[in-house]
Amino acid sequence: MGKAGGHTLTLLADALKSFPDHLISIQGHSDSRSIAPALQSLYPTNWELSASRAASAVRVLREAGIDPSRMQAVGFADARPLVKEIDTVSRRKNRRIEVLLYPSQFKIKAYRPGGREPAR
């Protein structure tokens, strides 16, 4: 992550401290181009790249004092583009992170493997 991105996330961390009762979902996105051969050993697909983008942002926020138990990193690859990719500028818009806040009173129910009742 570049200096500008890290600085922006540090400023964001200060703002996020105003929402102590919220889950912070950092969502990474990529463009639709294949990973360059030089980077394929680190990021075999855009899924790994987008997840790494989100995880890097989580690391910066944690270092800026955000409680790690409040955060999640999610990768969406190129599955949720902002714009149709027609050139370098549009591809750049799709390479991004998004930060979503969810009030902590909303609980996620997960189904237990092999069971019908949701776990609580």
Image: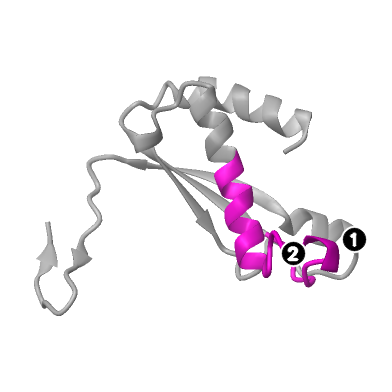
Q: Is residue 83 magenta?
A: no
Q: Which mark is residue 31?
A: 2
Read off the residue under disc 1.
Answer: 88
| Residue positioned 11% across, 77% down in the render | 115
Q: Specify few, some or many for label 2: CA neighbours under 10 Å numbering under 14, 14-19, or 20 or more.
A: many
- The amino acid pointed to by label 2 is Asp
Residue 78 position, x and y percent, is 66, 68
Q: Is residue 31 magenta?
A: yes
Asked if 43 appears above or below 98 in the picture, the reply is: below
Tell me the CA gap for discs 1 and 2. 10 Å
Q: Is residue 41 left or right of residue 10?
A: right
Q: Secondary structure at mark 1?
A: helix
Asked if 81 appears above or below 2 in the picture, the reply is: below
Q: Quadrant of residue 112?
A: bottom left
Taking depth in this image into account, of 114 and 100 the one nearest to the observer is: 114
Question: Going by the picture, which residue comes out furthest to the front?
Answer: 41
Asked if 20 appears above or below 90 in the picture, the reply is: above
State yes or no: discs 1 and 2 in contact (Cβ < 8 Å): no
Q: Secondary structure at mark 2?
A: loop
| Residue positioned 87% across, 70% down in the render | 86
The magenta stretch is 30-56
State whether residue 109 appears in this view: yes
